[in-house]
Structures are given as C-alpha cells and as structure tokens.
Amino acid sequence: MPKLLNFFKTYVLTITSSSRTSWEERCEQFERELHELRTRRDDVNAQNKLLHQQLDSVSSQIIALQQTRTTATDASEAGSPGAETDRTVEGLRELNIYLRREKEIGEVQYDIKIQEAKRLQQQLEYTQSQLDEARLKLDQERRSHADGGKTSIAHKDLMDKLNELNLFRESSITLRNEARQAQSQLADKTKRVDELLAQIQPLEAKVRELEHGKETMEGEMHLLQEDRDRWQKRNQDILSKYNRIDPAEMEQMKQAIETLRSERDALLEGQQPLQEKVLTLETTMETDRAQWQSTRQRLIDQAKERNRTLTKDKNDRAAERDVAISERDSLQEQLTSLQQQLQTAVAEKEAAETKLAEVQQELDEVKIQRDQALANAVQSVASPKTSPAPVATVSETNENFNAQLLELRKERDQVILEKQALQEQIIELKQQLESANSERDSAIADAAEARSQQKVQPSNTLIDDGAEEGQINESQNSGISEEEKKALEARIAAAEAMAKERDEKAKEIEESMENTLKQRSDKMKAALNKKLGESKEAVRLQLEADFKLKLEQEKQIWLAENKPADSSAPPPTPSAPKAEENTVPVIPVTPSKATAPSADGTDLSDDQVRHLLSTNPTIKSILANNLKKLLEKETQKLKAEQDKLMIEKLAEAQTTADATLTEAQAKAEHTQAQAVLMAEKKSSLKLNMLDNRIKMATAKIGVVEKAAKDTPEKPVSEVWEIAKNAKPPPPIPAAPTATPTQTVTLAQHPAASTTTATATAPPSNDPRTQLNSAPADGSKVEETEAPNSAIPLGPRPITPSTTNGASSLPVSNIPSAPQAGNQSRLPQMRGGNQNRGGASGGARGGIYQPRGGAMGRGRGNPTGQRGGMNAAAQSFNPNAQPGQKRPVPEGGQQGNGGKRPRGG
C-alpha cells in the first residue's frame, strides 16, 4: 500500500508539472501573439488616421479646384490642370478602396483571434479543474500519511518515557547506595574526630603547663633585671661619689688613641702615592688637552672628506648596532634563563633537604615507638629466660638503621658540598659576566664622552676665531677619529664575545648541576623509599616474631602448669612460684582483670592458693584460659595500635611532605617571578640608555651630513651675510601643528620675549640636570623618526616647555650673530625649522616661543638641517673649563650686539 501511494503521488506530481509547463508555454505563445496583434492594430489605426487626413485634404483640394474651374474664363488654358486633378482623384479613390479592404481583412483576423482565445480559455479552465482534483487527492494522501506519522511519533514518545522511567529508577537506586556509603563515611569521620579530640586534650594541658612555666620564667627574668639595674645604679652612685675613673676603661681609651694614631699615620702614608697619582693624572690631562688642540686643525681640514665617508660608515654602523642589540638581547635572555634555572635548582635542593630531614625525623619517631612497643610486649609476656633474643634482634635492627642513616647523611653532605661548589662557580661566572658588561658599557661611555669633548672644544675655539659657524661647527659633531672608533668597536666586540662565552659556560655548568642534583635527588628518594619499606617490613616481622614467641611462652607455661595435675601434691610446689613469676608481668598491663581472680579469696595465704591450684585442675584451667584470652586480646590490641600508628605516621609524613613541597614550589615561583621582573626592568633601563646614546650619535651624524651636502664650498662670510639678513621661513607643510601666524605675531615683540625666555629657561648649573638632559636630547632628536618605538624612554628632566619641538634640549652656550634693531639674529635660511641653540634662542635675542603655544618652531627635520645648532650641546656650567660663553645680558639685542670677549 505505501508503495502504491508513493507511485500515485509521483504520478500526480509529474502530470501536474508537465501540464503546468505546457500551459505556461501556451500562455507565453498566446501572449506573444496578442502583443503582435495589438501592435499591428495600432499601426493600422495610425495608417487609417493618416489616410483619413489625406482624404480630407484631397477632398478640400477638389472642392477648391472645382470652384476655381467654374470661375475660370479661359477654357483653353484650364484643360491641362483638370486632367491632372482627375488623375489624382482616381488614385486616391483606389487607395481608399484598398485600405477599406485591408481593414475588413484585419477585422476578420481579429474575430478569428477572439474565437481562438475563447477556445484556449476553455482549455485553461478544464486543466485548472483537473489540477484542483489532483491537489484534492494529494491533500487526502498527505492527511493519511500525517495520521500514520502521528501514531509512530506517539509510540516513540511512549518508548522514550519508559526509558526515562527506567533511568530514574536506576539513578534512585545508585543514589540510595551512595547515601548509605556517605552515612557510613560520616560515622567513621565522627569516630576519627572523637579520637583526635581525645589526643588534643592532653596536648592542650601540656601547652597550659608550658605557658605557666614561661610566665614564671619571665617573672624571674624581670626580677633579675631589676637586681641588675639596682646594682648598676649603686655602682654608678659610688663612682660619682668618689669621682673615680675605672682603670680598665682608661686603658681601653689609651689603646683606642694609639690605634687611631696608627691609622692616621697609615692614611697619611697612603695619601702621598695618591697625591702623586693625582699629579700624574693632571699632567696626562694637560698633555691630552694639548693633543686635542693640536689635532683640532687637522680635524677641521679633514671634516669635509670625512663627512662623505661618514654616510657609508653610518649605514655600516647602523647594521653593526642592530647586530649588537640582537646579541645583547640574546645574552640578556640567556642570563635570565640561567638565573631561573639556578633558582629552580636551589628550590629543588631545599625541598629535598627538608623532605630528607622530615623523613629522618619520622624514622627516628618510628624507631622510638617500635622500641617502646617491643619493650612493653617483652615486659608484659616474656620470661627472664627467653627475653635476650628479642633484645638482640632489636639492637641489630637499631644498628642497621643507624648505619643506613649514616650512609644517607654522608650522601646528603656530599650533595650539599657539590652544590656549594657549583654555586661558587656560578657566582664567579656571574661576576665575570658583570665585569664584561661593565667593560662594554665603559667602552661605550668613553666613546660618547670622547665625542662630546671633541664636539665642545673645537666648537669653542672656532667661535672665538670667527671661523665657520654654519658648516665647520657642525662637522665637529662627528666624534672621534677612525682609529679610536675601530679600537672602541673592537673592545665592545671583545667584551660581548667574552660575555657570550661566559654565558655559555655558565649555562653548561647550570645544566650539569641541574642534572647532578636531579640524579642525586632521585637516588635519595628511591633509597629513602626503599629503606622505609624495609624498615616497615622488618618492624612487622619483628612484631610477628615477638607475638609468636609470646604465644609459645604462654603455651609452655600452660603445659608446665597442667603437668603436675596428674601427680601428687608435693611435686608441684616448685612449679607454682614459676607460674606466679610468669603471671606477674601481666598485672601491670591489665590491673583490673588480673586482680579479679583474687577478689573472692583474699583471706587465703600463698601456700593455700598454690595447694588449691595444684589440687583443683578446673580452677587451674579456668585461670589459664583467662590468662590466655587476656594475652590474645592484649597482643591484638598492640598489633592494631602499632599498625594504626604506622599508617598515621606515614600519612602525616606524606601530607607534610606534600605541603612543604607545594610551599617550596610557590616560594620558588614567587622568587622566580620577582627575579624575572627585576631582570626585565634592568634590561629595559639598559636598552633605554643605549638607545638614547645611539640616537644622539645618529643625530650628530645627520647634522654633519646635511651641512656637507648643501654648501660644501661656500665661504663663511657669504653664509653669515645670508644668515644676518634672513627672516623666519614659513613652516614646513609636513608639520601638521605649525602655525606661522603666531610666529609672525611673536616676532613683533622681541624685547618682551627676550626677558621672558631668560626667566623661563635659565641655564642649568646642576650636574644632575646636565646628566639627565643627555637622554632627553637623544629622545627629542629621534622622536619623529621612530614614534612607535616599543623601547621605553628613560626619565626625562623637567624642562621649561614640553610643547615645542626643541624645548627639552639644554641651553646652548654658543653666542648668536650680531643683528640690527629688532631683527631676529638666528641663521634660519639654510636650516630647518629647528633654530640653532635649541630652546636658548629665546634667551639670546631670537624669537621667543611661549609655553604651550604653537609648534611652528623646532618641528623641522629631527636629524638637523644645514645651519642648525647642535641639539645635544651641554648646558652652561660656570665650573667648566675656560673658552665657553656666558648668556647675553639684558639689553643685548639693542645696538650691534657683537661678540663678547672670551673668558670664564
């Protein structure tokens, strides 16, 4: 049946789809034909309209011609036009007839098309009725199929509900079982809590006793202190009363005076070589200064040619700098990894030592408890004849344990010694690495200092002699000579290679130390675990042997007591004392039960009791059975307590070891994180300092290159004439924040700007400010070249203005050129937007840039332009060597404002 239904469905769908497609095709065809017919009808109507218009015009023409013909007087002249009009009228009539026929044909065709459309409409209605019937049948089949699907879905839902009910039943069973288990565990835990409370109470009593003892000791100590103060006061009163001096104190003071005198003499003796050394250093400084003065002229001559070679050297140096930075980063990473490995090794060593000490303490406690248990068991059961055997075994096991402990201690001491040796080696390597790093830093600092000295001294001499201020002064910024550069680079490379080699050596030693420590710790752990297992097994075997021995002794005692039962009364008398002696040790163990048999016969004497036991086998057997039961109970109790004690000790040892291990790991992670943080801060600081130095050097090289590239042959006089008559140039379009209007406005008030600049930007005399200004200079020079640098800059000093491009630079001590009137004296024609002298332009008669104002000034090329002053020039220092200039006094703008004489 389902197959038939499916077949019927597919058949109906195919029929409907085929009829639908055919009907759509027929409809499209009919629509096309109707569209064509409509277009043709419209064309025919248009033609008919035109023809009617033509007919009207022709008829009007005919009427006009007829009227003219009747009015014409000359018959001969009017013959030819009448014939022509007749011919046109005939043609028009024929055309009218043709058009009427065409109209009739079109109307007939239109009627035929209407009939065809009606026929097609009937076919459409018939097919639509068939389609409705097919859809009705399809809906009926779908309803029947949906009813069958609903029944299947209901059956499936019932099965799912049954499965869920089964699952709920199973889960309820499991939950009941778990509840029972939880209740049993709760009962066990409550028992455990009660036991722990019973153990804690005596400990609290001990703590109270100890606190009481502590209070008594504190009271005694307080009394002793009062006695001491009283006797001290009495002694002082006696001394002040008799005005005496203690001879011992006098002797000590004399000895102190002698020692101070000897120290003074030694210091005076050591001062002489130091003074000589200072004199030699001063002489060497003078010779060096003379050498610098002699090489100044040579450096001036070689400046232009060297500037051409500096471009290539700059590129090479940049590549070498990148390589050095990468090597430094790798060395820093290796150092941090070594420190981390060292910290982890130290933490592992400490954890192993603590664990070893804990295990040793636990072994001692277990040994003491075992000895106590053995002693109690031997005293309670063993006879004097059989007691030496367990004592011998106990002594042997003690000796074995002591020997094992000695071996473990020796191994631990050896590991500690090896670790100390490795730590000493690591410390030595770290010291060597620090020395190498310090040598490298000192070499870099020497290079920077040499460059700065070479920059300052020739510039001062050139300014005094009136030499080239525009181009030759900038050429002095190139630094030291090629030989010194190569020597410094060689020193830096050697220091870095040495540091790398020592880092590798330290890494190898760290790895070897870590491996040895790991092997030792694993070996010690395995040995300790093995020893613990062996000790546990030995203790267990020893206890079992003791219990068996006790049982044998009790059996022999019982047999010895039962033997005289068959004989006469006098022979058992010697054995009675033996039984009495054998039963005596049991009394301390269970005193209540041991004294119970004598409760009913306290009035009997010893002889009567012996006679009763020897003559009455029933009483003897009852007594023997009671003793045997008591002994078994005690042995079982001792065994259970011993096992429980061992398990608790092992569990406590494990928990304490885990706790100490986790605590040590946490401490190690904390210390490691702190060490990593400190190393990162240190490396970032070093990187900042090195980058600032590199930026300063690149800025100097860029200024020299620009000066040599623009006007290498122009004389100083022409340059100075141009600079003297120059005006402030318009701002460079590359600077988005430049405002030339404000610059022009400020140029109208030079006098006020001079005084304000001198007040807001004084020269720094503090050496700390001068030292801090160096990294700020480097950072400002390279600010536009690397705005997205990820390396943090160092701490910048507080400057008068931070909005201007050159505001953070130190005050220049190079004087400006003379000017006339209020005209600016800054040579800006051949430079960028950055004025010569940085922020000191306002104090030397130039245009003052207010704080927080527009950024038109100082936002030019950060590498320096032709004619700009050195951006990294040192601030004015009154304690410096002669040859440097002082700031221009007030009113220096007025008049000529020429150069001042040299002097301090």
Image (cartoon, helix red, strand yellow):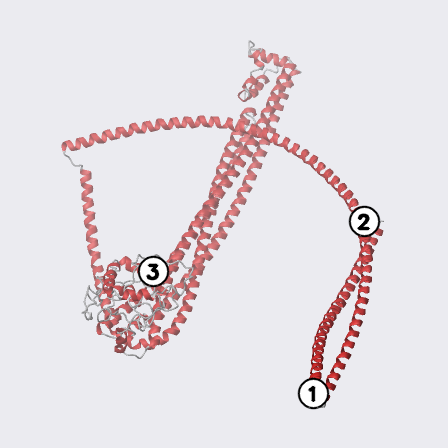
Spatial separation of the CA atoms under disc 2 and disc 3: 87 Å
Spatial separation of the CA atoms under disc 2 and disc 1: 99 Å
Between 410 and 834, the residue placed more toward the observer is: 834
Q: Earlier in the sequence, mark 2 or mark 3?
A: 2
Task: Identify the residue shown where x is 32% and y is 27%.
Answer: 220
Whether residue 194 sits left or right of residue 89 in the image: it is left
Whether residue 462 sits left or right of residue 613 in the image: it is left
Between 127 and 693, the residue placed more toward the observer is: 127
Q: Earlier in the sequence, mark 3 or mark 1?
A: 1
Q: In the rendered image, which residue does mark 3 sit on?
A: 803
Between 728 and 832, the residue placed more toward the observer is: 728
**Three-letter amino acid code at the position of disc 3:** Thr
Q: In the rendered image, which residue does mark 1 sit on?
A: 73
**Three-letter amino acid code at the position of disc 1:** Thr
Spatial separation of the CA atoms under disc 3 and disc 1: 115 Å
Q: Is residue 81 visible?
A: yes
In what element is the residue under mark 3? loop
Looking at the picture, how far across and down is residue 98, in whole percent? 78, 77
Q: Earlier in the sequence, mark 2 or mark 1?
A: 1
Q: In the rendered image, which residue does mark 2 sit on?
A: 141
Mark 2 and mark 3 residues within 8 Å of each other at the beta carbon: no
Looking at the picture, how far across and down is residue 346, in whole percent? 45, 48
Mark 2 and mark 1 residues within 8 Å of each other at the beta carbon: no
Q: Nearer the viewer, mark 2 or mark 3?
A: 2
Can you say whether 81 is above or below 296 in the image? below
Can you say whether 751 is above or below 679 in the image? below
Task: Identify the residue shown where x is 47% and y is 45%.
Answer: 666
Q: Nearer the viewer, mark 3 or mark 1?
A: 1
**Three-letter amino acid code at the position of disc 2:** Glu
Q: Is residue 389 visible?
A: no
Can you say whether 606 is above or below 724 in the image? above
Looking at the picture, how far across and down is residue 771, in whole percent? 30, 59
